[in-house]
Image (cartoon, rainbow, N blue to C red):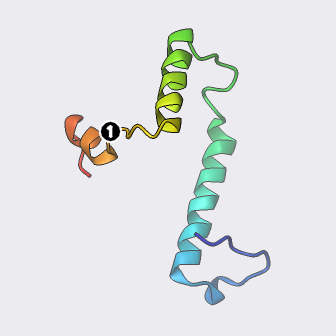
Amino acid sequence: MPRVKAKVKVKDLTVEELQELIEQTVEQTLFELLGDPDEGLELREEVKARLRRSLARERKGVPGIPAGEVAHKLGLGW
């Protein structure tokens, strides 16, 4: 998505640019209000090990599970 330049009038934005501006504003506002709830927390060693294994498989070219398949297994709409 394109970044909106400063000093541009809303009337001059495309729909896509306006949507991006709204998304950025909401994200920034939520972060300012709520902060990062995970800030300062440490990952457990077993989570770090699992992430390392996952990255190693990815580097070797081993395909992961498609997101649609994961969503289906979890009963999520995709």
Outermost residue on the top side: it is: 45
Q: Is residue 38 above or below residue 19?
A: above
Residue visible at 49% across and 23% down in the picture: 53
Of 26 and 76, nearer the camera is 76
Above or below residue 63? Residue 3 is: below
Q: Quadrant of residue 8?
A: bottom right
- Name the spot of residue 36 as percent of width and height, x first: 64, 33
Residue at image point 61% right, 26% down: 38
Q: Residue at x 51, y 81 (%)?
A: 15
Instruction: Give left or right: position of 43 versus 75.
Output: right
Q: Residue flagged by tag 1: what amino acid is it? A: Ile
Q: Residue furthest front?
A: 60
Residue at (62% x, 88% y) in the render: 11
The quarter of the displayed image where residue 13 is located: bottom right
- Closer to the camera in the image, 74 or 55: 55
Q: Which residue is mark 1?
A: 65
Q: Position of residue 24 (x, y in %)?
A: 62, 60
Determine the secondary structure under disc 1.
loop
Q: How many marks can you see? A: 1
Q: Residues within 10 Å of mark 1 (few under 14, many from 20)?
A: few
Would you say 45 lies left or right of 28 here? Answer: left
> Residue extending furthest bottom?
12
Q: Which quadrant of the structure image shows residue 43?
A: top right
- Residue 10 drawn above or below residue 22: below
Q: Residue 19 location in percent, x, y?
A: 53, 71
Quarter occupied by the N terminus: bottom right
Single out the residue that lies furthest toward the right.
7
